[in-house]
Amino acid sequence: MLSIGSIVIRVDDLERQMSFWQAALGYERRHEPEDGFVILQPPGGAGTCISLDQVPATVQIPPRLHLDLYTGDQHAEVHRLLALGATRIEGSKRPADADYVILADPEGNRFCVVDTAGRGN
């Protein structure tokens, strides 16, 4: 049986991206960055980690893979993430009644903020 231990995001500016994702998710460093790589983990270490790997790469639009971040307060979380440096992605194929908002981190890596209010998730 396999499980996802970490999702790796390629980044240009490790410090900026580390600050963004730590603030966005409330994650902590598993260790200090080394050789342009760091693992961010949920507080206490249990759960899926986000790893940041400083490797020059072009952001693909649309991305082949993205994160869905779940919240019961989508409005507040979207505003909080925008204040941290995320940007809203407009003009996608997102239906008008979608339960998600598409954002991008400071380097353009897309993710969705999914409204779980009333879904029991």
Image: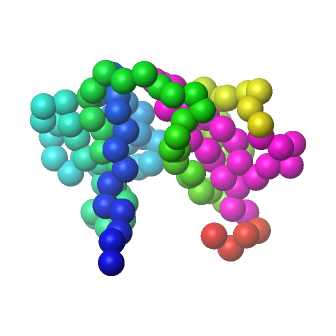
Q: Residue at x 87, y 42 (%)?
A: 96
Q: Quadrant of the C terminus?
A: bottom right
- Spot the residue most to the bottom: 1
Residue 116 magenta: yes
**Where in the figure is residue 116, as x and y percent of width and height?**
69, 62
Is residue 41 left or right of 74 when viewed as pictured? left
Q: Residue at x 70, y 42 (%)?
A: 101
**Residue 82, visible in the rendered structure:** no
Between 48 and 66, the one lying in front of the other is: 66
**Where in the figure is residue 27, as x and y percent of width and height?**
36, 50
Is residue 85 left or right of 6 when viewed as pictured? right
Q: Quadrant of residue 48?
A: bottom left
Between 71 and 4, the one lying in front of the other is: 4
**Where in the figure is residue 24, as x and y percent of width and height?**
47, 42
Q: Which residues are magenta?
A: 94-117
**Where in the figure is residue 76, as x and y percent of width and height?**
66, 44
9 over 120 or under it: above or below: above
Between 58 and 84, the one lying in front of the other is: 58
Q: Residue at x 76, y 52 (%)?
A: 99
**Residue 37, visible in the rendered structure:** yes
